[in-house]
Image: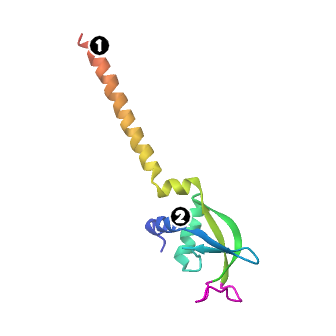
């Protein structure tokens, strides 16, 4: 079952991906800490949920997947195909919890405004 915790954990895992090197010939990307849809169905569902929410976007579809051999060589046949996802600005905001900071700032600013208005109101009506 896909939980919110798994969805955000998958999003954080995506943020740690990086291209370690590009193998030639063929410009094959070797991605460190890759998140694969083939790991289990929950990861695939979490990735689709992130995509549905606009937190990730598929960069390239149908990329062949390989697991490197013990000596770093590519096997002859891919183990499957999957898209490569990139984080959108909304995805980065979820990771860094930017929305929480924006809401907190709004609450503090509103409270400050109300306190200022009340102070001005009472100072005018008390004659001080």
The quarter holding residue 44 reads bottom right
CA distance separating discs 2 and 1: 55 Å
At which x and y percent is residue 30? 63, 75
Question: Is 63 in the magenta?
Answer: no
Query: Regarding mark 1 in the picture, which secondary structure is present there?
Result: helix
At which x and y percent is residue 125? 27, 13
Q: Is residue 101 depicted above or below 77 in this figure?
A: above
Say which residue appears at 66% left-offset and 65% top-offset.
58
Left or right: 35, with 5 as reference point: right
**What secondary structure prevails in the magenta region?**
loop
At which x and y percent is residue 53? 57, 58
Query: Regarding mark 2 in the picture, which secondary structure is present there?
Result: helix
The label nearer to you, 2 versus 1, is 2
Left or right: 122, with 42 as reference point: left
Residue under pointer 1: 124
Q: Earlier in the sequence, mark 2 or mark 1?
A: 2
Say which residue appears at 67% left-offset and 85% top-offset.
74
Magenta residues (range): 67-79
The quarter holding residue 21 reads bottom right
Identify the image's colour scheme: rainbow, by chain, secondary structure or one colour: rainbow
Closer to us: 102 or 18: 18
Closer to us: 9 or 45: 9
Say which residue appears at 46% left-offset and 49% top-offset.
99
Q: Is residue 111 depicted above or below 2 in this figure?
A: above
Residue under pointer 2: 15
* Circles 2 and 1 in contact, beta carbons < 8 Å: no
């Amino acid at each position: 079952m896909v939980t919110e915790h798994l969805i955000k954990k998958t999003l954080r895992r995506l943020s740690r991906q990086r291209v370690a090197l590009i193998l030639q010939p063929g410009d094959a990307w070797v991605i460190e800490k890759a998140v694969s849809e083939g790991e289990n169905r929950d990861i695939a569902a979490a990735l689709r949920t992130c995509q549905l929410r606009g937190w990730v976007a598929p960069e390239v579809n149908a990329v062949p997947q390989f697991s490197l051999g013990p000596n770093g060589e590519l096997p002859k046949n891919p183990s499957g195909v999957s898209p490569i996802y990139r984080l959108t600005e909304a995805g980065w905001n979820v990771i860094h919890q930017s929305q929480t900071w924006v809401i907190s700032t709004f609450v503090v600013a509103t409270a400050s405004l109300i306190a200022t208005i009340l102070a001005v109101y009472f100072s005018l009506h008390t004659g001080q």
